Image (cartoon, helix red, strand yellow):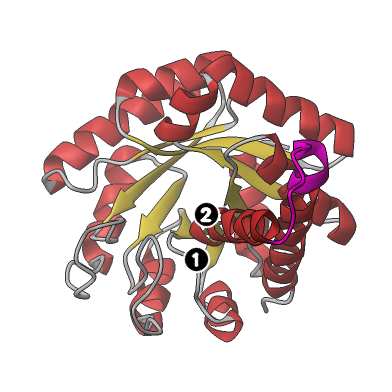
Amino acid sequence: MKLQEKFIELRNNGKALLATNFYNFETLEGVLQAAKATNQSIILQLTQSSIDYMSLPVAYNLARTMLNHNGVEGWIHLDHGNSYELAARCLDIGFDSVMIDASEQPFKDNIAVTSKVVKLAENYNANVEAELGYIAKLGQEKDGSGFTQPKEAKLFVEETGVNALAVAIGTAHGFYDKEPKLDLERLSEIAEITNAALVLHGGSGIPGASLQQAIDRGICKINLATEIKNMFMKTLKNEFLNNNEIDLRKVFPVATKRVTELVIEKLEIVKNGK
């Protein structure tokens, strides 16, 4: 099933998918073991930084091979793609979905760039995600300004034909200084007047009850990245402090297991939405 078809099914049934970033074999293995254990589908995400780190062919083929090896239904997605050229490279190699993030550009320019990627993706029958509004990235202010305007969201989806839309309703990338307050009424209004699958970025650190409420009000995709990196690295640091083991094949699996446990918790939250 194509991801855009899955989104229609999810939207009709008030359900969502968890979308997790991975950074190496170990984090990917941790995520997929969680999906396998819970018998749930998952979206595997790669950013430009991860692609640069692993190389596009290695990262893509690793993800595709591991999905098949574990018997998990999943899709490979470009997260926060910042150019038409990167989206084209990812689609050409076989990605199921790409995000073009022109959210920091003027509204008309965001429409123009997104429309161009949507037209390209039609040749691959692939899903396209865009972002509208201000969702603070790492190092940026999280002041609550720049929330997605429902009428702009409606126009944006109609003009671009985009399949999925990341909306700004109070989340941010990275860790939160305090528990975020999601604008659920705004989310409901956006869901009511658009037909795109709505995406919640900045899923790390959001309480389960808030995630479930967001799903109930139209969110079809929840992104998780920062908590995965943090869990993996904190576990490794603790392991290194407590022993002198030099065999990475004995040390890394401990951190991988903790990633699995984390993602299982998130998958259970998503599964129980509505």
- Residue 257 vs residue 195: left or right? right
User: Which residue is rendered at x = 38% and y = 81% of the image?
Assistant: 180
Q: Which residue is mark 2?
A: 225
Type of residue at label 1? Gly
User: Which residue is rendered at x = 56% and y = 41% of the image?
Assistant: 45
How many residues crowd mark 2 within 10 Å: few (<14), some (14–19), many (20+)?
Answer: many
- Residue 10 vs residue 207: left or right? right
Q: Position of residue 53 (x, y in %)?
A: 48, 27
Residue 251 located within the stretch drawn in magenta:
yes
Q: Identify whether 118 is placed above or below 45.
A: above
- Residue 13 vs residue 138: left or right? right
Q: Nearer the viewer, residue 199 or 180?
A: 180
Q: Position of residue 41 (x, y in %)?
A: 76, 51
Q: Secondary structure at mark 1?
A: loop
How many residues crowd mark 1 within 10 Å: few (<14), some (14–19), many (20+)?
Answer: many
Asked whether residue 32 appears in the rendered view, the answer is no
Mark 1 and mark 2: Cα distance apart in space: 8 Å
Residue 217 located within the stretch drawn in magenta:
no
Type of residue at label 2? Ala
Q: Are marks 1 and 2 in contact (CB under 8 Å)?
A: yes
The answer to which image quadrant residue 161 occupies is top left
The quadrant the N terminus occupies is top right
Q: Position of residue 95 (x, y in %)?
A: 58, 26
The quadrant the C terminus occupies is bottom right
Q: Position of residue 227 (x, y in %)?
A: 55, 62
Q: Which residue is mark 1?
A: 203
| Magenta residues, start to end | 242-252
The answer to which image quadrant residue 228 occupies is bottom right
User: Which residue is rendered at x = 24% and y = 57% of the image?
Assistant: 139
User: Which residue is rendered at x = 66% and y = 66% of the image?
Assistant: 15
Q: Earlier in the sequence, mark 1 or mark 2?
A: 1
